[in-house]
Amino acid sequence: MEKKIKVLIIDDEEDFTFFVKLNLEQTGRFEVLVANEGEKGIKLARENLPAVILLDVLMPFLPGPEVARRILDDPRTSKIPIIFLTAIVDRKDLGGSSVREVGGRHFLAKPVTTEDLIAAIENVIKD
């Protein structure tokens, strides 16, 4: 049996994380961890060392860019690729694509299809 890809979702929208987790796990290819707040996400990243982190940009208390900074500043987690998820931009803003690299960071526009999410995950973990 092929080893599952461990994905950590850090997003304050509980319904969104529930459905993303459900859809990814139903493929049989992913193990998904969820944190609905930044501090918990940082802790889960350190404890579980996921292959990739899906990180919301706008969250209360600790915004996504600060969560990313703390994860990238920690030697244990600094190599984990991060895909920012955001409703701030849409496909049109990303040049018609659902995922785009901006300033060395990957951005994925919400809402996102499971197929686009899987493609983005596969793209960043192969780098």
Image: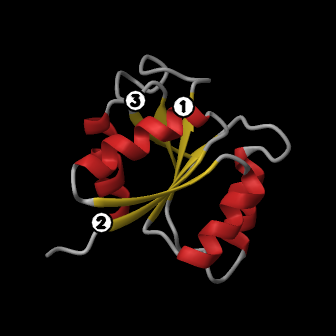
The front one of 95 and 77 is: 77
What's the residue at 72%, 59% (across, down)? Answer: 40
Q: How crowded is mark 1: few (under 14 residues within 10 Å), some or many (20 or more)?
A: few
Structural distance between the alpha carbons of marks 2 and 1 = 29 Å
Q: Is mark 3 on a helix, strand or loop?
A: loop
- The residue where tag 3 is placed is 112
* Sooner in the amino-acid sequence: mark 1 or mark 3: 1
48 up-or-down from 20: above or below = below
Q: What residue type is labelled 2?
A: Lys
* Sooner in the amino-acid sequence: mark 3 or mark 2: 3
In this rendering, position of residue 103 left or right of residue 4 = right
**For discs 2 and 1, the disc positioned in front in the rendered view:** 1
Quadrant where the C terminus is found in the figure? bottom left
The tag on residue 15 is: 1
What's the residue at 45%, 24% (across, down)? Answer: 111
Q: Which amino acid does label 1 sit on?
A: Asp
- The residue where tag 2 is placed is 126
What's the residue at 17%, 74% (across, down)? Answer: 2
Q: Which residue lies furthest to the left in this view?
A: 1
Q: How crowded is mark 2: few (under 14 residues within 10 Å), some or many (20 or more)?
A: few
